[in-house]
Amino acid sequence: MHRAARAQAWPLLPAGRLQLSGLALLVSAVLLLGLAQFTSIDLWLADSHFDVATQRFAWRDHWFAAVMMHRWVKVPLILFGATLLLLALSETLWRWPRLQAADRWRLRSSAALALCIPLSISLVKQFSASHCPWSLERYGGQTPYLRLLDALPAGFDPGACFPAGHASSALWLAGLCVWWLPHRPRAAAVVFAASLAAGLGLGWVQQMRGAHFLSHTLWAVWIAAAWVWALLLAFALAQRPRALPLPSTPQA
């Protein structure tokens, strides 16, 4: 059978694995909620990077964290994503004849995730009351610390710091795993995990600078994983055979 035909005829992931992944997302969301609301791990980690003597986060203006990891790494990733979007738009408008149907879907899907993952994280931030660590009274700022579900006290503006936006510049790469599905699932899993790890790495540097808490980064990772899972689910539902209408019963 032709490669493209095979890619379209079979789900990208077995149904059981897709269901298990959905369950893992649900469980992890509950765990992350509990972590952010009922533990102090965010404060413990932020405290470890805060210099009490100078009342500053030691890595806030460090060249490695503020320039290399926040600018030099971020810009190429944004340009890569923009290039992918332009390629998908070009293919949609002019229909490249040599591109197989399966690869056309992969191009459009990975480009869509390159847009949707950072955009959705940015959108959630707009409704967030949480302030960044360096703005908190505990760390020399002027705003109170809020846990994830805490209400914003009167007289304070929303912080719009949750989830971690900088991490999303790498997290969208998780959508590239579709290029290895369904025929090389292990390679797809490696690409997916490596992309989430890259996002975690960028988020960790921001935590060292006092720009985010750990829970901010973990929720950004969760959103990226949820988008990839939703894409695979949508593909599986679209490929599901449609039921044929029952034949009418002949009347006597």
Image (spheres, rainbow, N blue to C red):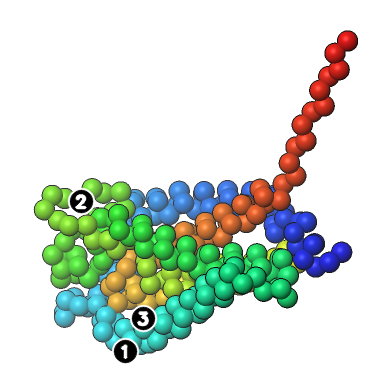
Q: Looking at the image, which residue is at 27% across and 61% down?
A: 160
Q: The residue tagged with tag 3: helix, strand or loop?
A: helix
Residue linked to disc 3: 70
> Is 16 above or below relative to 76?
above
Q: The residue tagged with tag 1: helix, strand or loop?
A: helix
Give the tally of numbered discs. Answer: 3
Q: Residues within 10 Å of mark 2 (few under 14, many from 20)?
A: some
Q: Position of residue 229 (x, y in %)?
A: 58, 56
What is the quadrant of residue 10 in the picture?
bottom right
Q: Position of residue 29 (x, y in %)?
A: 46, 51
Residue linked to disc 1: 63
Residue linked to disc 2: 152
**Left or right relative to 24: residue 72:** left
Sequence-wise, which precedes: disc 2 or disc 3? 3
What amino acid is found at the position of numbered circle 3 in the picture? His
**Left or right relative to 15: residue 199:** left
Q: CA distance from mark 2 to mark 1?
A: 34 Å
Q: The residue tagged with tag 2: helix, strand or loop?
A: loop
**Left or right relative to 153: residue 209:** right
Frontmost of labels 1 and 3 is 3
Q: Quadrant of the C terminus?
A: top right
Sequence-wise, which precedes: disc 1 or disc 3? 1
Q: Residues within 10 Å of mark 1 (few under 14, many from 20)?
A: few
Sequence-wise, which precedes: disc 2 or disc 1? 1
**Left or right relative to 223: residue 245:** right
Q: Which residue occupies the extreme left position in the image?
A: 155
What amino acid is found at the position of numbered circle 2 in the picture? Leu
Q: Position of residue 151 (x, y in %)?
A: 23, 48
Q: Looking at the image, which residue is at 52% across and 65% down?
A: 113
Q: Residues within 10 Å of mark 3 (few under 14, many from 20)?
A: some
Q: Quadrant of the N terminus?
A: bottom right
